[in-house]
Image (cartoon, rainbow, N blue to C red):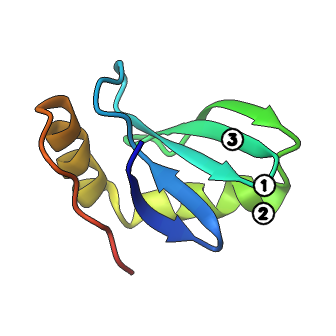
Amino acid sequence: MPTVAIVQGILIQLFFSDHDPPHFHFRGPGFSGRIEIASGAILSAQGDVPVRAQRAPQQWTLGHRAPLMDNWRRARAKQSLKKIVE
């Protein structure tokens, strides 16, 4: 699963053959989850996810929807993904 960004130490990753709705995965030490790109809502979370680890990628999503959706479409087409930089 390619990492497209790192937000406050949290990995932002996309799968190449993932399912709708468009989302990305976030991973940190001992936790992981999925966030919907359109709304920034947490779809699922596993492990002990600190509040900061929920808020940081949610807030980041708000300013990066366009490149996230571009990478979502690229992943679905099995194309290489682009790094998203601040």
Write the residue at 45% across / 48% down: 13
Label 2 sits on residue: 52
> Marks 2/3: CA distance?
13 Å
How many residues crowd mark 2 within 10 Å: few (<14), some (14–19), many (20+)? few
**In the foreground, 82 or 58:** 82
Q: Position of residue 45 (x, y in %)?
A: 72, 33
Are the residues tagged 2 and 3 within 8 Å (C-beta)?
no
At mark 1, the secondary structure is: loop
Residue depicted at x 35% and y 63%: 64
What's the distance in space between the residues labelled 1 and 3, CA to CA?
A: 8 Å
Disc number lying in front (1 or 3): 1
Precedes in sequence: disc 2 or disc 3: 3
- The location of residue 32, given as percent across then percent down, is 68, 41
Using the rendered view, name the quadrant where residue 59 is placed: bottom right
Q: Which residue is mark 3?
A: 32
Q: Nearer the viewer, mark 2 or mark 3?
A: 3
Q: Residue at x 34, y 20 (%)?
A: 20
User: Residue 68, position in %: x, y?
Assistant: 30, 52
Marks 1/2: CA–CA distance: 13 Å
Q: Residue 42: which quarter of the image? A: top right
Foreground residue, 42 or 82?
Answer: 82
Residue 15 spot, x, y in % from top left: 37, 34
The mark found on residue 14 in the picture is none
In this view of the protein, which residue sits in the foreground, 41 or 22?
22
Callout 3 amino acid: Ser
Q: Earlier in the sequence, mark 1 or mark 2?
A: 1
**Residue linked to disc 1:** 29
Between disc 1 and disc 2, the foreground one is 1
| Left or right of residue 58, residue 3 in this image | left
Q: Which quadrant would residue 34 be assigned to in this image?
A: top right
